[in-house]
Image (spheres, helix red, strand yellow):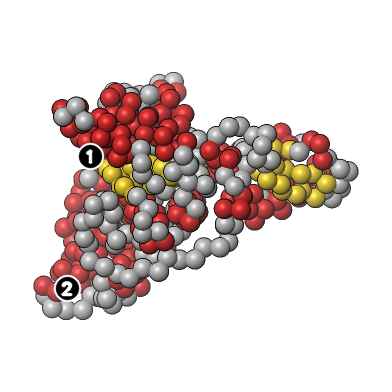
Amino acid sequence: FWLSCLDHFQKELNAQQFNTWIKPLEIDLALNGDNKVVLIAPNRFVSQWVADNFIMHIESMAKTYFDKNIQFHLKLADQTDTKNNALNQMPQSALSPLEVKPEPKTVYQPTKKNLNGLNPNFTFNNFITGKANQLARAGAIQVAESPGVAYNPLFIYGGVGLGKTHLIQAIGNYVHDNNKSAKIRYVHAEKYVSDVVSAYQHKAFDKFKLYYHSLDLLLVDDVQFFGGKNRTQEEFFYAFNALIETHKQVIITCDTYPKEITGLEERLVSRFGWGLTVAVEPPELEMRVAILLKKAEMEKIRLDENVAFFIAKHIRSNVRELEGALKRVLAFSRFVNQDITLDLAKEALKDLLAVQSRQISIENIQKTVADYYKIKVSEMYSKKRSRIVARPRQMAMAIAKELTSLSLPDIGEAFGGRDHTTVLHGYRKINELRVSDPLVSRDFNALILILRG
Ligand code: ADP
Ligand code: MG
């Protein structure tokens, strides 16, 4: 039964959710009673989440399967007989349950450069949550409340401008506010690389180690920059081990999943997966609106909801672009000394929107997608059906549907006179895969970003 449950959830959830919440669960065979099944969760975070979100599903599936009521209970893994890693060694008492989430009290301060690399403007308070980032935020808060004991490392990944830096900076600021003597270091991966280079030049690796190995909290941003830099990876491997062994928190962000970082040593790839790995995804429309309203409030400007909707509808790629558009509208409104109305916003963003729609022709999409997958453009309209060309072709169709106002038959025509049902099928297939396959989702988002310029 459990196997069929797993099978069901694997189809229902995206890979990220499945791997985070369902896969770690085990059935406690020792305790199987008649109408009672105990599931073992590796930690309180997973346990709480499963209890809130999945137990009812599982119970109703069991009812259909066995034709009787079976109750599922959750139990935390016994700390002594689980694998020897820091995640499982955490004292349960130190973990606060998920529902306790006091927001940090932060006063808004001007940006100032700190020695530890933290920017006090990035806080949990001004981080808007929605489906796209709620797991990442929940994990981040958990780690900020009990650094070194919850998940180690915390690995946050996602595309550009989706709030990774904001989130790890917020963790740093939260820890700093709670414990002024904590030794915290936020470092962008490129800066870390140049620190290694300069340690090399000055033969100062002892000093380098002394510093990095004695931190309480190390935040490394954009770790994909370590790819191919072997000496950096070696130094980081030592630092990582030293910190994790002494239960000091390590937090990493990256533009991809650990396994997909090109040129990263296997031992680091596997270590990056020791703790909790969570994604930040592109925000949906309502969340983009909420972000705009929040940013406007922070800037103390009045922004009508319909204006926010207009901006959010047209600026879809990421939060950074969204902020850019809002700044533009604001600057324009100050320049012409008029309130922000829908017309004013349209006027202010005119060039931006024109550039967007002009660039995105179907030929452009076909060429961009073909280049991305390293196939010939002609294969976009050829009759070939091999997977190597069929998937990119479907991707191009889906993107054409998404980014242009062309009808399905128009799109089919542009792809070698294919039927509109073929286009629809391709579009649906890609949308399905975007949920279940992180690679497809990443490719789709990357292509949209490239095409939008
Ligand atoms: P990344 O590091 O993923 O490229 P950033 O953290 O630099 O993205 O975010 C880009 C901009 O968008 C920042 O100004 C950040 O404050 C803002 N931002 C991103 N996500 C959110 C969010 N959920 N709520 C509020 N602001 C956000
Ligand atoms: Mg960043």
In front: label 1 or label 2: 1
Where is the C terminus found, in terms of image quarters? top left
Image-based side of 349 in relation to 247, left or right? left
Vertical relation: 277 (above or below) 117: above
Which residue is depicted at the point 73% across and 38% down? Answer: 27
| Vertical order, 107 against 276 (above or below) | below
Marked residue nearer the N-terminal end (1 or 2): 1
Total count of labels: 2
Q: Position of residue 85 (x, y in %)?
A: 55, 34
Q: Nearer the viewer, residue 426 or 434?
A: 434
The three-letter amino acid code for the residue at tag 1 is Lys
Residue 327 can be seen in this image: yes
In depth, the one of 21 and 12 nearer the eye is 21
Indicate left or right for 362 with 278 as reference: left
Kind of residue at disc 2: Ser
Give the percent coordinates (x, y) of residue 199. 20, 31
Q: Are marks 1 and 2 in contact (CB under 8 Å)?
A: no
Which of 128 and 360 lies nearest the eye of the viewer? 128
How far separated are the C-alphas under marks 1 and 2? 38 Å
Tell me, yes or no, if residue 371 can be seen here.
no
Left or right of 315? Residue 204 is: left
Secondary structure of the residue carrying tag 2 is: helix
The picture quadrant where one finds residue 283 is: bottom left
User: Is 303 located above or below residue 8 in the figure?
Assistant: below
Residue 333's disc is 2
Q: Is residue 48 left or right of residue 59?
A: left
- Name the secondary structure under disc 1: helix
Is the residue 193 above or below the residue 121 in the image? above
Give neighbour class at mark 1: few <14, some 14-19, many 20+ (Cα, 10 Å): few
Which residue, given by chain and number where applicable, does mark 1 sit on?
Answer: 191
